[in-house]
């Protein structure tokens, strides 16, 4: 199974994904969100998904995953998480600021300690690495990350993802490449990271694709070709978006960010895209600057 479950929409009461309003409980208490997380995790496991991705900034996502693993007695699921952002909303959906980014050694030490107190992770990632991150010049941080006994990777955001990917994979500690995995935004509206991700894959890195629904835009506001292909295949536009991501030969894992069991089932509906479909989808990508400007304007809800 090349599909993983991302916990960004399930670990906290507010996120920027479109379509969460009707997918989640109206009363988004920690207990209600825990139950919603368990339901999606149960459904994902039953469907064959064996990789779950969380982050320190996803509210209580790590806690929910740890509790689910313990209560269900599950031992064959790989868990990855991320550090670098801190959740600051204190469970308030209307918070002015929901998370704060800091790529420092002190932040890493604290968050790594917090993560490993809850979970045994197989991959620990820098959250939203960009070319201006101080990590690139912080040799002490790089050395500490290389020394934790767990493979380390990074996720990327922003219009310069490709440059960040190439620069990050050039980093070495004691003659060894620091990072072994990358998790990047790739979807039909934002394909600019594709060539750099293909290069990383060819050099042995694990490539994970996130935000393949463009934070819900492709599912809730699908462009004409996506809607047309969905109708022809008897599936939803979200399944078409997933199929397009899975069609990339350099993608090792594609994350579903489903917020409910019905959303997960819709994401997992198999769609075999043909040559005509790929031709229709080829020119949907927006200029990266436009795409990320639109994303940054999405409201937390």
Image (tube, rainbow, N blue to C red):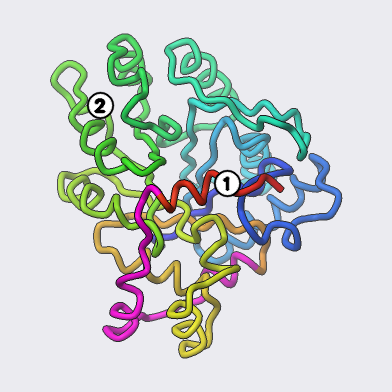
Q: How would you rate the neighbour count of disc 2 (Cα within 10 Å): few for under 14, some for 14-19, many for 20 or more? A: many
- Nearest to the observer: residue 141 or residue 49: 141
User: Label 2: which residue?
Assistant: 178
Secondary structure under tag 2 reads: loop
- Name the residue located 39 percent from the left edge and 64 percent from the top edge: 188
Residue 154: quadrant of the picture: top left
Residue 221 vertical position relative to residue 210 in the rendered view, above or below: below
Badge number at residue 251: none
- Nearest to the observer: residue 188 or residue 110: 188
Q: Say whether residue 286 is left or right of residue 165.
A: right
Residue 160 vertical position relative to residue 229 in the rendered view, above or below: above
Q: Residue furthest bottom?
A: 232
Q: Which residues are magenta?
A: 263-289
- Name the residue located 51 percent from the left edge and 58 percent from the top edge: 256
User: Label 1: which residue?
Assistant: 297
Q: How would you rate the neighbour count of disc 1 (Cα within 10 Å): few for under 14, some for 14-19, many for 20 or more? A: few
Earlier-in-chain disc, 1 versus 2: 2
Secondary structure under tag 1 reads: loop
Could you tell me residue 201's position as x and y percent?
22, 49
Could you tell me residue 156's position as x and y percent?
38, 39
The question of residue 75 being in magenta is answered with no
- Name the residue located 31 percent from the left edge and 13 percent from the top edge: 138
Closer to the eye: label 1 or 2: 1
Could you tell me residue 230's position as x and y percent?
49, 82
Q: How many marks?
A: 2
């Amino acid at each position: 199974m090349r599909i993983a479950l991302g916990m960004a929409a399930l670990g906290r009461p507010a996120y920027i994904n479109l379509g969460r309003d009707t997918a989640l409980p109206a009363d988004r208490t920690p207990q209600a969100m825990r139950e919603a997380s368990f339901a999606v995790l149960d459904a994902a496991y039953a469907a064959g998904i064996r990789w779950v991705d969380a982050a320190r900034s996803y509210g209580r996502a790590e806690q929910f995953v740890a509790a689910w693993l313990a209560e269900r007695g599950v031992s064959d699921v790989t868990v990855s998480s991320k550090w670098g952002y801190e959740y600051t909303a204190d469970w308030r959906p209307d918070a002015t600021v929901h998370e704060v980014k800091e790529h420092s050694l002190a932040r890493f030490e604290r968050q790594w300690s917090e993560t490993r107190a809850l979970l045994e992770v197989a991959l620990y990632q820098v959250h939203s690495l960009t070319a201006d991150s101080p990590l690139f010049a912080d040799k002490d941080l790089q050395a500490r990350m290389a020394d934790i006994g767990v493979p380390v990777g990074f996720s990327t955001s922003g219009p310069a993802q490709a440059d960040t990917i190439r620069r990050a994979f050039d980093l070495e500690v004691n003659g060894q490449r620091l990072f072994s995995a990358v998790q990047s935004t790739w979807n039909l509206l934002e394909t600019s990271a594709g060539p750099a991700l293909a290069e990383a894959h060819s050099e042995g890195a694990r490539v994970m694709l996130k935000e393949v629904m463009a934070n819900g835009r492709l599912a809730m506001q699908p462009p004409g070709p996506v809607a047309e292909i969905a109708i022809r295949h008897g599936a939803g536009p979200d399944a078409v978006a997933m199929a397009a991501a899975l069609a990339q030969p350099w993608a090792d894992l594609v994350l579903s960010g489903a917020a409910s069991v019905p959303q997960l089932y819709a994401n997992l509906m198999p769609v075999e895209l043909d040559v005509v479909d790929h031709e229709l989808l080829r020119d949907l990508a927006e200029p990266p600057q436009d795409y990320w400007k639109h994303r940054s304007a999405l409201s937390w809800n």
